[in-house]
Amino acid sequence: MYQNEFVKPIKRFFLTIICCLATDTAWADFASTLPLGTVAGYQVKYYDRELFHYLVNEIFTQKTYFFESPTDAPLILDCGNNIGMSILYFKSIYPKATIIGFEPGRKTFEILQENIKHNKLENVTLHNKALTNKEGFMNFYTFAPGEGRSSLFEERLDAIKRAGVKTYTEEVEGDLLSKYINQEIDFMKMDIEGAEFDVIEEIASKGKLRFIKQMIIEYHHHVKEQEDEFSKFLKILEDNGYGYQITANSKKVFPHGKPSRNHCQDILIYAYRKNV
């Protein structure tokens, strides 16, 4: 998510200082001043205008997460909510949907909660947790609330570190997605910045992957430059009876017209259970 490398170092540094040093009261005061944007009749609180417009284009204009459902009240798992734009989109196409969402960053989660509450969305359950393959508290690396590249993997922020942007670490609670899958899931969206392999492997090992009829997963290739596990990821899907379609941004592989080995590439996978 959010691949614009032309970050604004001064603004990012200011937001990082707020996140690191502000008391809960000071953060609440700051959050109360955040601007509101409008999309599809919803009002959305955000902290970064550039990111907000990126998400509007990706989710509402390009309809990246559109799916067809045989029911008007699908059960949706939304893994990696950010400030809630994908949840708003799902509710715009399926108002009766039941959505279970996950977002680890505490300050981002507060903005997410406010956006769901402000728009009076029903049947939405939010969890302030990081999805991974183990339970317990762990480090979460970021540089601003609502930032799409925040991750359990420090390497995910290497590019912005090279641009001189300050980062910080917070402790978040990790959890297992398999605990939340106890019936058929109509659709799952997953954008969790590098943890997708661990999560898909975990739910497959518990026999829960096959509960999911359709899913769109953003696979982050080369979060760690020396790890090439994409074929293993696809093999998990194949072994569990899924077909898939794949798209990727070639500009991230050839950013200057030449092949590059050190860029994290976002690969979008649409996977579907073949027996449905």
Image: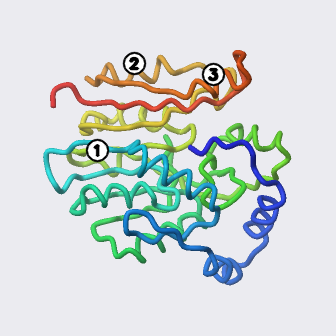
For the N terminus, give its image quadrant. Answer: top right
Circle nearer the N terminus (1, 3): 1
Residue 147: x, y in percent? Answer: 63, 54
Q: Residue drawn 52% across and 68% down?
A: 37
- Above or below, 65 against 103 in this view is above
Q: Residue drawn 29% across and 47% down?
A: 181
Q: Please name which of the two marks, 1 or 3, marks the residue nearer to the observer.
A: 1
Q: Is residue 156 left or right of residue 75?
A: right
In this rendered view, identify the residue nearer to me: 261 or 45.
Answer: 45
Q: Please name which of the two marks, 2 or 1, marks the residue nearer to the observer.
A: 1
Q: Residues within 10 Å of mark 2 (few under 14, many from 20)?
A: few
Residue 98: x, y in percent? Answer: 26, 60
Per the image, the residue denoted by label 3 is 227
Per the image, the residue denoted by label 1 is 187
What amino acid does circle 1 point to? Phe
Q: Residue drawn 76% across and 55% down?
A: 168
Q: Residue drawn 29% across and 71% down?
A: 122
What amino acid does circle 3 point to? Glu
Secondary structure found at label 2: helix
Determine which quarter of the picture holds residue 172: bottom right
Q: Tell me if label 2 and label 1 are in contact, CB under 8 Å.
A: no
Per the image, the residue denoted by label 2 is 235
Q: Is residue 273 left or right of residue 180?
A: left
In this rendered view, identify the residue nearer to me: 12 or 77.
Answer: 12
Q: Tell me if label 2 and label 3 are in contact, CB under 8 Å.
A: no
Residue 146: x, y in percent? Answer: 60, 59
Determine which quarter of the picture holds residue 257: top right
Residue 43: x, y in percent? Answer: 45, 72
Circle nearer the N terminus (2, 3): 3
Q: Is residue 71 left or right of residue 105?
A: left
Q: CA distance from mark 1 to mark 3?
A: 29 Å
Q: CA distance from mark 2 to mark 3?
A: 16 Å
